[in-house]
Protein backbone atom coordinates (compact mmCIF):
# COMPACT_ATOMS: atom_id res chain seq x y z
CA UNK A 1 0.00 0.00 0.00
CA UNK A 2 2.80 2.44 0.90
CA UNK A 3 4.68 1.55 -2.29
CA UNK A 4 1.56 2.26 -4.34
CA UNK A 5 1.22 5.69 -2.68
CA UNK A 6 4.87 6.55 -3.33
CA UNK A 7 4.49 5.54 -6.99
CA UNK A 8 1.37 7.67 -7.34
CA UNK A 9 3.16 10.55 -5.60
CA UNK A 10 6.10 10.32 -8.03
CA UNK A 11 3.79 10.38 -11.05
CA UNK A 12 1.79 13.30 -9.59
CA UNK A 13 5.03 15.22 -8.95
CA UNK A 14 6.12 14.61 -12.54
CA UNK A 15 2.74 15.69 -13.92
CA UNK A 16 2.79 18.84 -11.78
CA UNK A 17 6.34 19.69 -12.86
CA UNK A 18 5.44 19.20 -16.53
CA UNK A 19 2.34 21.39 -16.11
CA UNK A 20 4.44 24.12 -14.46
CA UNK A 21 6.97 23.97 -17.29
CA UNK A 22 4.26 24.75 -19.85
CA UNK A 23 3.00 28.00 -18.34
CA UNK A 24 3.30 31.05 -20.60
CA UNK A 25 6.53 32.92 -19.97
CA UNK A 26 8.24 29.99 -18.27
CA UNK A 27 11.29 28.40 -19.90
CA UNK A 28 10.75 25.46 -22.20
CA UNK A 29 12.01 21.94 -21.66
CA UNK A 30 15.13 22.48 -23.78
CA UNK A 31 16.00 25.64 -21.82
CA UNK A 32 15.59 23.73 -18.56
CA UNK A 33 17.75 20.82 -19.66
CA UNK A 34 20.46 23.14 -20.96
CA UNK A 35 20.46 24.94 -17.58
CA UNK A 36 21.30 21.72 -15.71
CA UNK A 37 25.12 22.00 -16.12
CA UNK A 38 25.03 25.65 -15.00
CA UNK A 39 22.91 24.63 -12.00
CA UNK A 40 25.44 21.98 -10.99
CA UNK A 41 28.40 24.36 -11.32
CA UNK A 42 26.69 27.24 -9.50
CA UNK A 43 25.64 24.92 -6.66
CA UNK A 44 29.09 23.34 -6.38
CA UNK A 45 30.74 26.78 -6.24
CA UNK A 46 28.27 28.00 -3.60
CA UNK A 47 26.79 30.76 -5.75
CA UNK A 48 23.35 29.13 -5.96
CA UNK A 49 21.83 27.96 -2.68
CA UNK A 50 18.40 26.97 -3.98
CA UNK A 51 19.37 23.30 -3.86
CA UNK A 52 22.03 21.22 -2.17
CA UNK A 53 24.89 19.17 -3.47
CA UNK A 54 23.28 16.20 -1.71
CA UNK A 55 20.09 16.59 -3.77
CA UNK A 56 22.14 16.86 -6.97
CA UNK A 57 24.06 13.74 -5.96
CA UNK A 58 20.78 11.92 -5.37
CA UNK A 59 19.61 12.98 -8.82
CA UNK A 60 22.87 11.68 -10.33
CA UNK A 61 22.44 8.38 -8.50
CA UNK A 62 18.87 8.10 -9.80
CA UNK A 63 20.09 8.67 -13.37
CA UNK A 64 22.80 6.06 -12.89
CA UNK A 65 20.24 3.60 -11.52
CA UNK A 66 17.96 4.03 -14.52
CA UNK A 67 20.72 3.48 -17.08
CA UNK A 68 22.54 0.82 -15.07
CA UNK A 69 22.13 -2.83 -16.03
CA UNK A 70 22.05 -3.65 -12.30
CA UNK A 71 18.57 -3.28 -10.78
CA UNK A 72 16.92 -4.03 -7.48
CA UNK A 73 14.11 -5.67 -9.47
CA UNK A 74 15.59 -7.10 -12.70
CA UNK A 75 13.50 -6.76 -15.86
CA UNK A 76 14.63 -10.15 -17.21
CA UNK A 77 13.09 -11.96 -14.24
CA UNK A 78 10.10 -9.85 -13.23
CA UNK A 79 9.29 -8.06 -16.51
CA UNK A 80 6.59 -5.52 -15.58
CA UNK A 81 7.69 -5.09 -11.95
CA UNK A 82 11.27 -4.67 -13.14
CA UNK A 83 10.26 -1.88 -15.46
CA UNK A 84 8.02 -0.30 -12.83
CA UNK A 85 10.91 0.41 -10.44
CA UNK A 86 12.84 2.11 -13.25
CA UNK A 87 9.75 4.10 -14.22
CA UNK A 88 9.25 5.22 -10.62
CA UNK A 89 12.84 6.41 -10.31
CA UNK A 90 12.67 8.08 -13.73
CA UNK A 91 9.42 9.87 -12.82
CA UNK A 92 11.00 11.23 -9.64
CA UNK A 93 14.16 12.24 -11.50
CA UNK A 94 12.28 14.04 -14.27
CA UNK A 95 10.15 15.93 -11.76
CA UNK A 96 13.21 16.86 -9.69
CA UNK A 97 15.14 18.08 -12.76
CA UNK A 98 12.20 20.19 -13.93
CA UNK A 99 11.61 21.67 -10.47
CA UNK A 100 15.27 22.41 -9.79
CA UNK A 101 16.02 23.91 -13.21
CA UNK A 102 12.87 26.07 -13.10
CA UNK A 103 13.91 27.51 -9.76
CA UNK A 104 17.48 27.97 -10.98
CA UNK A 105 16.40 29.80 -14.14
CA UNK A 106 14.21 32.13 -12.02
CA UNK A 107 17.25 32.76 -9.80
CA UNK A 108 19.44 33.43 -12.85
CA UNK A 109 16.95 36.01 -14.16
CA UNK A 110 16.78 37.85 -10.84
CA UNK A 111 19.48 37.24 -8.23
CA UNK A 112 22.01 35.69 -10.59
CA UNK A 113 21.77 38.55 -13.06
CA UNK A 114 22.22 41.12 -10.28
CA UNK A 115 25.23 39.22 -8.92
CA UNK A 116 26.78 38.94 -12.40
CA UNK A 117 26.35 42.67 -13.02
CA UNK A 118 28.07 43.52 -9.73
CA UNK A 119 30.97 41.21 -10.38
CA UNK A 120 29.77 38.31 -8.22
CA UNK A 121 31.73 36.54 -5.53
CA UNK A 122 34.07 34.81 -7.96
CA UNK A 123 35.50 37.93 -9.60
CA UNK A 124 33.73 37.33 -12.89
CA UNK A 125 32.27 40.16 -14.92
CA UNK A 126 28.99 38.39 -15.79
CA UNK A 127 30.20 37.40 -19.29
CA UNK A 128 32.34 34.50 -18.08
CA UNK A 129 35.72 36.27 -18.10
CA UNK A 130 37.70 37.51 -15.15
CA UNK A 131 38.00 41.25 -14.69
CA UNK A 132 41.17 42.61 -16.21
CA UNK A 133 41.52 39.67 -18.56
CA UNK A 134 41.61 40.42 -22.27
CA UNK A 135 39.37 38.03 -24.15
CA UNK A 136 39.33 37.79 -27.93
CA UNK A 137 36.16 39.40 -29.26
CA UNK A 138 35.65 41.68 -26.23
CA UNK A 139 36.11 45.42 -26.54
CA UNK A 140 38.75 46.78 -24.20
CA UNK A 141 38.05 50.31 -23.01
Image (cartoon, rainbow, N blue to C red):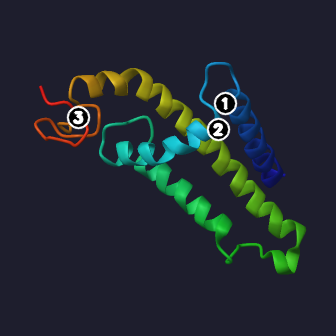
Q: Residue at left 22%, top 43%?
A: 136
Q: Residue at left 34%, top 49%?
A: 44
- Residue identified by numbered label 1: 21
Q: Helix, strand, or loop for circle 3?
A: loop
- Looking at the image, tell me whether mark 2 or mark 1 is earlier in sequence order: 1
Q: Residue at left 71%, top 38%?
A: 13
Q: Helix, strand, or loop for circle 2?
A: helix
Q: Foreground: 13 or 35?
A: 35
Q: Foreground: 128 or 1?
A: 128
Q: Is residue 128 left or right of residue 81?
A: left
Residue 71 location in percent, x, y?
70, 74
Q: Are marks 1 and 3 in contact (CB under 8 Å)?
A: no
Residue 90 location in percent, x, y?
70, 55
- Between circles 2 and 1, the one closer to the viewer is 2
- Residue identified by numbered label 2: 29
- Looking at the image, tell me whether mark 1 or mark 3 is earlier in sequence order: 1
Eyeballing the image, is 23 above or below 124? above
- Residue identified by numbered label 3: 138
Residue 79 location in percent, x, y?
88, 72
Q: Is residue 77 left or right of residue 67?
A: right
Residue 20 location in percent, x, y?
68, 27
Quadrant for residue 67, please give it. bottom right
Q: Are marks 2 and 3 in contact (CB under 8 Å)?
A: no
Q: Residue at left 29%, top 34%?
A: 127
Quadrant for residue 62, please give it. bottom right
Q: Are marks 2 and 1 in contact (CB under 8 Å)?
A: yes
Quadrant for residue 23, please give it. top right
Give the crowd class for mark 3: few <14, some 14-19, many >=20 residues within 10 Å: few
- Looking at the image, tell me whether mark 2 or mark 3 is earlier in sequence order: 2
Q: Is residue 81 left or right of residue 64?
A: right
- Between circles 1 and 3, the one closer to the viewer is 3
Eyeballing the image, is 60 above or below 12? below
Amino acid sequence: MAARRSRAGAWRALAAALARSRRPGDPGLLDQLSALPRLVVATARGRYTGTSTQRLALMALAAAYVVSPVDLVPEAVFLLAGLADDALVLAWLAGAVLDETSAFLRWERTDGAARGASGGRDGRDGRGSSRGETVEGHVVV
